[in-house]
Amino acid sequence: MSDNQQAITEDQWHQAELIWDFHQMRHELRPVDVAIGLGSHDLGVAAHAAELYLSGLFPTLVFTGGNSPTTATVFPRGEAVHFREHAIDLGVPAEVILLEPNAGNTGQNITYSRAILAAAGIRPATVLLVSKPYMERRSFATAVKLWPDVEIRCASEPLEFDDYLKSIGDEKLVLDMLVGDLQRVIEYPKLGFAIEQEVPGDVHAAFESLIRDGFTSRLIAS
């Protein structure tokens, strides 16, 4: 951890782990028509999508995502482009990958990917969303709202919270993102962006505690 990163306390760790666990849907992996890899700062999404393709879970893979302030430096040609290249390096045939390089948020990830698939003549009944571990619940809620006639399932790298923190290398950033994603799970249904999901009391208390402790850089105005 660098000097300008905030060390987290044992209590903050416990609160964050509650939120981490809530964010994951724990869907059973089974064959689907299409998978969509949601762009982000985490190249592990592309690696996990490649692993799932190579295990035979789906015949077509979409990578979606343009750039955000978090990813512009890391993936200068766009999230989806870099994800596609990484998946090809890991053995996924280029011809099974569809590229959606313009989405700037999760709603666009879903809407634009759906359009790319339709243009290719693919109208799936089942879709697997591959995302960062803490983005599963929000991406699920968004996709069910925007694409209600397909069965949505979620997957992410099977990492424990501690292992994910080490893989990213910035504890403050990860806790900020956990809090920010949970706020979106809570607030987006009110804006019509996602379906509503019940947040358990202990998870909501953890959310409020971490906000009080200053893990707020990814919050939206609400």
Image (cartoon, rainbow, N blue to C red):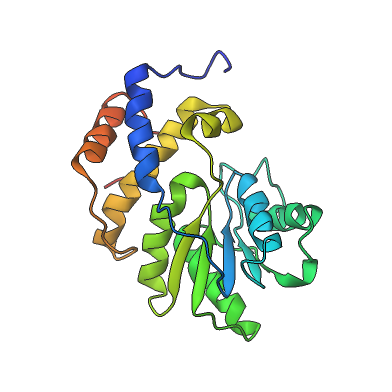
Residues 44 and 85: in front is 44
Please give left or right for residue 151 compared with residue 12 in the image: right
Q: Position of residue 85 (x, y in %)?
A: 76, 55
| Image quarter of the N terminus | top right
Please give left or right for residue 117 compared with residue 15 in the image: right
Q: Position of residue 161 (x, y in %)?
A: 47, 33
Please give left or right for residue 151 compared with residue 103 in the image: left
Q: In this picture, is 101 found above or below 96?
A: above
Q: In this picture, is 36 found above or below 206?
A: below
For the view shown, which residue lies furthest in the top direction? 3
Q: How many marks?
A: 0
Q: In this picture, is 215 found above or below 69?
A: above
For the view shown, which residue lies furthest in the bottom direction? 121
Q: In this picture, is 77 found above or below 143?
A: above
At 35% across and 69% down in the image, what residue appears? 145
Q: Visible in this render: residue 220?
A: no
Q: Position of residue 21 (x, y in %)?
A: 38, 41
Q: Visible in this render: residue 143?
A: yes
At 45% across and 50% down in the image, what residue appears? 135
At 23% across and 53% down in the image, what residue appears? 198
Write down the quadrant of residue 36 in the picture: bottom right
